[in-house]
Amino acid sequence: MKKIFIILAIVLTVVIIIHRNNLQPNKIPKMVPVLMYHHFEVDKNDSNEMIVKKSEFEKQMRYLKNNGYTPISMKELKKFVEGRSDLPKNPILITADDGYLSNYNIMYPILKKLNMKATIFIVGNYIDNAGKTNSKLPKLTWNKIKEMYDSGLIGIGCHTYSSHVKGDTISGKMGIFSSPLLGETKKEYEKRINNDIEKNINAIKLNLGYQPISFAYPYGDWSETSEKILKDNGIKFTFVASGGKEAYIQKSYLLKRVCVNGSYNMEDFKRELAKQN
């Protein structure tokens, strides 16, 4: 009987080891490209680099699809980092910042047609006040966000509640979420940004029934203090705006993104994408 138990224990150990090995990222690229968008227009009439023309965006998405890239969600990335699932051969993250209405009118229909996933990082007070103030760039409403979220294609992340502004901080002119304002104590700063991210998270939970796990820093500005507070509030992934090879799947914080310039043609897009491989 004792021998039987020993044999069973050995078999069970082997099964566990095999299972763990199957979850290791040996066959997965060492980095996941992260694309960053903002606003879209049908016909682009200005030189704003943050605005991407509808036809160009569709060409870019079709290129990804036709060349074996698989857009993934933050939930899928989280499962992989935790060792609970694998990733496809050529994973990629598609992200859009701020929460513009064009994400619903232009970006979403294209992604839906191609069955591709993306994450929108929303500024909470933009959404809560959508339609209440005059704006050259209309913002999303919660109803439209929920429709996209319920499709299973669009994930929602945080982009602060009301701190997407630059101000005079002890570190210079930069995003006020990532540094104390002049005259503000460290304790006051910590309380301010903790209240901000809590409000951002709670707005998403209230309207979508979902605890967001990702955060994109406005302007790409960050600090060790802001990182700690985000982690304390359940954020698993943080993103900055700087370009370069990333996002390393061995890490979860301060992941770099490639800002897709509105002036890019397809050759430019392919060249930037190739740098990530």
Image (cartoon, rainbow, N blue to C red):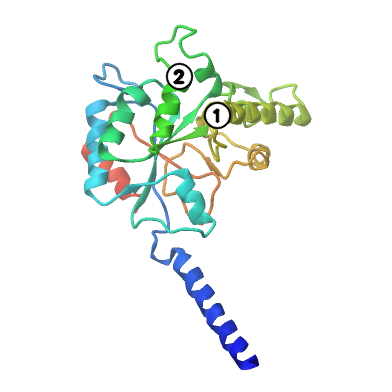
SS at mark 2 in the image:
loop
Q: Position of residue 159 (x, y in %)?
A: 53, 30
Q: Position of residue 118 (x, y in %)?
A: 39, 38
How packed is label 1: few (under 14 Cα within 10 Å), some, or many (20 or more)?
A: many
Residue drawn at the location 53% of the way across and 82% of the way down: 11
Identify the image quadrant of residue 151.
Answer: top left
Label 2, label 1: how far apart the Cα atoms are: 12 Å
Q: Is residue 47 toward the left or the right of residue 156 in the image?
A: left
| Residue sitting nearer the eye, 51 or 142 | 142
SS at mark 1 in the image:
helix
245, above or below 140, in the image: below
Q: Looking at the rendered structure, which numbered label has been put on residue 100?
A: none
Q: Position of residue 219 (x, y in %)?
A: 51, 30
Q: Position of residue 128 (x, y in %)?
A: 53, 17
| Residue sitting nearer the eye, 263 or 81 | 81
List the residue tagged with mark 2. 141
Q: What is the residue that sits farthest to the front in this orientation? A: 1
Q: Quadrant of the N terminus?
A: bottom right
Callout 1 amino acid: Ile
Q: Does the CB distance between marks 2 and 1 fall below 8 Å?
A: no
Residue drawn at the location 75% of the way across and 21% of the way down: 183
Residue 268 visible from this viewpoint: no
Q: Quadrant of the C terminus?
A: bottom left
Looking at the image, tell me whether mark 2 or mark 1 is earlier in sequence order. 2
List the residue tagged with mark 1. 204
How packed is label 2: few (under 14 Cα within 10 Å), some, or many (20 or more)?
A: some
Q: Is residue 62 toward the left or the right of residue 218 in the image?
A: left
75, above or below 52, in the image: below
Callout 2 amino acid: Thr
